[in-house]
Amino acid sequence: MTKKIIWVVMSCLMLVSLILTSCDSQEDEGSVAQQESGEVVITTTETGGSEETSTSENGQTTTTSDEPQYGGALIVAAVGDVTFFDPKDWVGGGITLDLTNQRLWDGDWSKGPAGGYGTNETDWASSYDVRAHKMGYLAESITFVVDDDGINGHIIYKIRPGINWYVSPYSEASQLVGGREVTADDVVYSLTRVTTDTTANIYRSNPALRDAIIEKTAPDEVTVTVPVERLLEAGKRFGDSTFPVPQEVIDTFGDMKDWENNVGTGPFMLKDYVTGSAAVLVRNPNYWMTDPVGPGEGNKLPYLDEVRWQIIPDASTRLAGLRAGKIDTLTDIPYEDAKQLDINTAGQGLMNRELAKITLKPIYMRTDKEPFNDVRVRRAMMMATDFNTIEEGLYDNTGNILTWPYDYTPAYKDLYLSLDDPDCPDSVKELYVYNPEKAKELLAEAGYPDGFKTDLILINTEVDYYSIVKDQWAKVGIDLNLQVVEIGQQTNIQVSKSHEQLITAATGPPSVWPMLIVLTGEGWQNSSIIDDPIINEAAAEIGFKAITDEKGAMQDTRELMKHVLDQAYVIPAASYPTYCYWWPWIKNYSGERSIGYFWVQSWPQYIWVDQQLKDSMK
């Protein structure tokens, strides 16, 4: 069987350009060379201190050098407890996992602001998976191949040599591993584990990957074989959502659910974790990566001695800690809280930037059950919701109301269908215009002239928003009961699809667009249980096309949205801007939110603390 190489991702120490998912049409995708063999290689370029003057609150001016300093601690606030230390349980937003463990590939820090020394090809303000902005981590290169008959596709990972599992004095499990080198066998074991362990997130959310063939094909090479229509999905899940682990730890301890059993290759190692209090991580002295750009280019990473995630559920307490300088940086600050910090002037010497807009979780519904299997009922629910009044009242017209399945993001603008676009169907536009009279007519046509009662499963932080929706729906006869549960319980309900009627559920960032996971399939992300032949057919074509023609695939996705939105499968929530604030003694930082796909919080490995400036501002 002959094969055709359709994409190759090459890595040279710190830099690599990588496959899979969207890039903005205006963004530089690097220099592309087409070789006679059909091999496509994307090459990337590096960017290459000075002194800066900072003024503290007391008016004293302190001159600090751009030359990075080793030592010090970064204190960051976490909203809730760490929910997993075992990589197989990862569902995004790893907090500690993104610092202790690493994926096969991830985002390239240097392609963003990088403290003023990056290329600014992206802003890393949200979760992006843009081809030209990726680099190899545990994988030195990634090659995508499709058989000539078009039936199967293959992903070939060449494992980077010279990376070792860390040895921590706080972890018996790491001492068991003994700091040995990461091998292709580790990768085979880890990929197999997440597709065969019934408790693993990938097993539960991506059932189509359970039959993937994962094998060691050379001493430093791992090959994954899947049906070609699953090639994109496999690339994302195995590359971006899997953290390789050493098998002997699992064989000995059963899993890594205990923080002391976590073993990785990341820049930091867990020193301590106290539920409801803090997670403390210390520098991995044998970390393999170096600083890619700026005055510290080539320096051994990380610079910090310690990262402390303080668990502070209360928003006002987090803001108070930031103001007092007890917290060095705080991200995802909602619009209403950011106003207290003076958004325009960043008072008290704080630095700030606007991040991507976010939204509360939208309402998913059981479209396989009455009454939600009737499109007239779903459209009535949309028209009974006054999106504009909610957005104006809560967010001062700073957000969007068309937010599902994608909110507007510059990097993915080619897939976004705006209500202002001339080709947006009138039948879609009318769904976002408050019209209780039309809603009543549709309910009557569907056999519910007096409306109906229904339950919405949600968490406490969503009650205020959906209480507004409850009042609005009552005017058309829809009696909405708010069933408040803990977030862990809600997550379990979503994953098991055990909700009977309505549930607020996470949608995922725009970077998941090629897989259309909230619109198709048996995965838990499809919480409205959508099984639409038009969407199913388009999804297969879009997923394959995205491998070689990202822009074209995004345009096809935008065209599909005309049908998807018209069906009203989900009731969206209005989005609003969020902000990141940090003290100026945190250097080499530009408010980055996620260095790669799905809220990758690996940025602390690049930043350093200017202790002199910090002391002068205290």
Image (cartoon, rainbow, N blue to C red):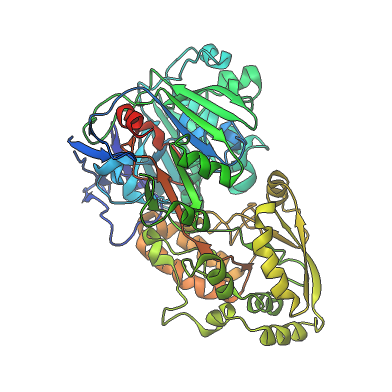
Is 415 rendered above or below residue 30?
Answer: below
Residue 377: in sight, yes or no?
yes
Residue at 59 percent of width and 47 percent of height:
206
**In the image, farthest residue toward the front:** 58
Residue 223: image location, x then y, percent: 45, 36
Query: The C terminus appears in which quarter of the rendering?
Result: top left
On the image, the x and y values in percent for residue 601 come to 45, 39
> Which of 5/83 is in front?
83
Choose top left, top right, bottom left or bottom right for residue 502.
bottom right
Q: Is residue 13 left or right of residue 271?
A: left
Q: Residue at x 58, y 19 (%)?
A: 249
Left or right: residue 453 compared with residue 553: right
Residue beneath the point at 34% across and 30% down: 608
- Residue sitting at x 47%, y 77%: 419
Q: Which quadrant, please, contains the N terminus?
A: top left
> Is residue 595 at all visible to an observer of this figure?
no
Q: Nearer the viewer, residue 492 or 30?
A: 492
Position of 234 with respect to 259 (left or right) is left
